Image (cartoon, grey):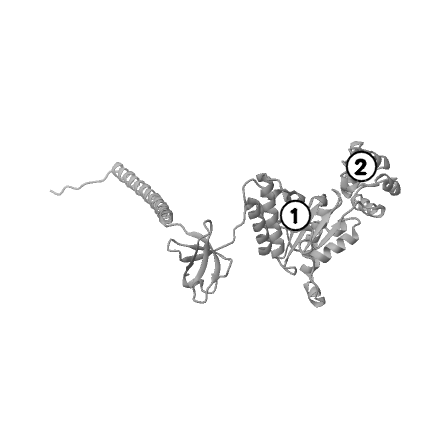
Amino acid sequence: MDETIYNTPEDSDMSKLRLQELYDQVEELSMKVEFLNRENGRLEKEVAQLKKENNQLKRPPLFVAAVIDVMDSGEVYLRQQGNNQEYITHYIDTLEGKLKPGMKVAVNNALSIVRTVDNTFDSRVRVMELEESPNVTFAQIGGLKEEIEEVREAVEYPLTRPEIFEKVGVEPPKGILLYGPPGTGKTLIAKAVANQAKATFIRMSGSELVHKFIGEGAQMVRELFSLAREKSPSIVFIDEIDSIGSMRTQDGTSGSAEVQRTLMQLLAEMDGFDNRGNVRLMAATNRVDMLDPALLRPGRFDRILEVSLPDEKSRLEILKIHSAKLNMKDVEINSLLKITENATGAEIQAICREAGMNAVRNNSDYVTMKNFTDAVFKVRRKTRSEDIMYI
């Protein structure tokens, strides 16, 4: 007799529950497989990167050399950096026509040229370059009309209008030196020229070239002018040049000898660039009497300009510039001109600023004459030490 099996509702619910559990397990396993695949891909990339780094570490290093000459035979005359060894070698086909004297190249253990090397500069030289032109204009400089025009003739016009010099047949001055008391506007003139000429402005203080180790200062001078040529048109401005350009003596100390080596490298670089090139040289000092005669001769600094204390007309222009934004009331400009006699442009700027601060301190809406007189007394009571040059 046939036996018929009947599924009860309880059996059906159990089957559905079991089936759902199987689905959940399959989904969980799928997620684990997906995660493991992702992890495997990540590990494969990491292994590939480690293999690449390992191969690079196993690869022999390349040596840096400088190209002395490219010979007609297709060979290259090199001098290796550091030990100054010289040798003749070959280069790979992809460098055909790209090698020039003075270029840096990388050579392998067989002393064959592998590739060229870009110029590298000391980070201390890099930070001297201003990324943007200074925002100082000639309108912000009171007086100094003649000095500004002479600076523009020597620095700006050779960069912006070189055809004039070629037409007339005259060589522009190679370098220009500004000297005078502190605060008279020497650095402002240099910034304004750089702004007008739209040139790369490389500013440094002479003291930055003074270093302890032998040859370090001279190396920085070489890299400074190399950077200027690479970034041309450019203006190199050396402030406080007396710190490295002072008169050479017979002092036998190592520090003095290193400063003199730096000076001699600077003299060599000044002789090395062309008058009509796209690199213009400016310098400033308030101790021109200390400078070495080799710096002052024609051919190095062809134009030497004194930036003296402003006269009455110049002081009036400076006062108008720095007081233009002040809300003034009952201020007698002629009286200010008398009490600011022999003041520098920097002192007049400080007086205008201090007068405004006096008004703020008194919670006033205006800057009055009393604010200015108090400011003059405060700024000028600290009598600056008179240098023997300016007595």
**3D distance between C-alphas at marks 1 and 2:** 33 Å
| Residue 342 visible, this angle | yes
| Residue 126 visible, this angle | no
Corner quadrant of residue 231 = bottom right
Amino acid marked by disc 1: Ile
Give the residue at mark 2.
355
Q: Is residue 9 left or right of residue 107?
A: left
In this rendering, is residue 259 above or below 164? above
Residue furthest out toward the left: 1
Q: Residues within 10 Å of mark 2 (few under 14, many from 20)?
A: many
Residue furthest out toward the front: 250
Give the residue at mark 1.
238
Q: Which mark is residue 162?
A: none
Q: Residues within 10 Å of mark 1 (few under 14, many from 20)?
A: many
Q: Comparing marks 1 and 2, which lies closer to the viewer? A: 1
Amino acid marked by disc 2: Ala
